Amino acid sequence: MVAIKIGMLHYVLDHVYGAFMHRTKLTTPFFSRGWGGSKLDLLENMIKQIFPAAEAQNLPPRLIEPMWKTVWETKNACLKEGIFRTPCDEQLINALPPESHIARVAFLAPKFVPPHKMACVVHLAGTGDHGFERRLRLGGPLLKENIATMVLESPFYGQRRPFLQSGSKLLCVSDLLLLGRATIEEARSLLHWLDFEAGYGKMGICGLSMGGVHAAMVGSLHPTPIATLPFLSPHSAVVAFCEGVLKHATAWDALRQDLSAAMTLHEVQEHMRHVLSLTDVTRFPIPKNPNAVILVAATDDGYIPKHSVLEVQRAWPGSEVRWVTGGHVSSFILHNGEFRRAIIDGLNRLKWKELPN
């Protein structure tokens, strides 16, 4: 009975936090400028090209050449920040806001350890995670395990945020798909750089919430086995915007007006489900090593229902789900230790890369 009451408190906390953040008039809602017109059509077609999924795993990432500067270093570790032009194709670049054309990344690594004896995990941003600090705090303690952390700043976030966008509230539905597609391309290119340029012995990809959805997609499409670690993540953006707390943060009236004023709210939400079905991770191929897929989910998550997490596990046999006690917000704050343990365990399920003779 006590456990049920505590679980309910976590669930209520998510809704109280969501109400404060999303139902008040302090900020604009998501998608206040509608669907995105021709950009949405373009992105729907581009994302559909990923399916059928088997061929997509063999698409080579585009090469990048990051320019690095050292932020600080100690006797044991070094933090660098880098920039590179987003590796997206010209169609996608033209659809992105100019502020998002240059990608930003932070790279925290141990010193004096050969790269082929280290692992590196690319950390992707959750909703509202601007900049590098949160994810560097998550990855920092892993230095002692010889695990480096690479943090990608998402398009539409931080210094890549469009001038007219308020905080994390994307202006159009097309921006959500743009953010996802560009993040996937950039993360794939970073993993390729870590493998072939930096020479790391093992690699992984992780992310919280929205970042976990993108991490699952990247892990699915990567041509070699990597640790794939979605934390507090749904199987699809449909869950976040049509079922969870964020449905209260969505500008449904603006979306209805952009389609047809005669449509009902239910019809608009069904159209949203159809569009966001493109983000369904279960439609992507099974990663090369599903045993190195570890999902960490919360028992009382007001944003992500349990069925959504289990759909990924069913679609990717061999993957593991670990449950932490809490809601979305409380787990994000309290369970970094469990996220780090999942990172370590996922990497331990990979073989070290063989050095060329």
Image (spheres, helix red, strand yellow):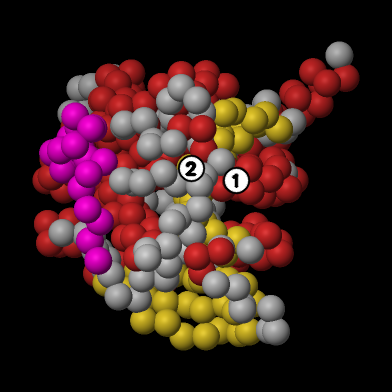
- Say which label, 2 or 1, has the lower sequence index: 2
The answer to which image quadrant residue 49 occupies is top left
The answer to which image quadrant residue 118 occupies is bottom right
Q: Residues within 10 Å of mark 2 (few under 14, many from 20)?
A: many
Q: Residue at x 76, y 25 (%)?
A: 7
Q: Residue at x 52, y 38 (%)?
A: 292
Quadrant placement of the C terminus: bottom left
Magenta segment includes 116: no
Q: Observer-nearest residue: 286 or 199?
A: 199
Quadrant placement of the N terminus: top right
Q: State the residue position of label 2.
A: 228
Q: Amino acid at mark 2?
A: Thr
In the rendered view, tell whether residue 151 sits above or below residue 69.
above
In the rendered view, tell whether residue 43 sits above or below residue 105.
above
The answer to which image quadrant residue 191 occupies is bottom left
Image coords of residue 93 (percent x, y) = 18, 62
Image coords of residue 201 (percent x, y) = 49, 59
Image coords of residue 24 (percent x, y) = 55, 44
Q: For residue 321, say whether it is visible.
A: yes
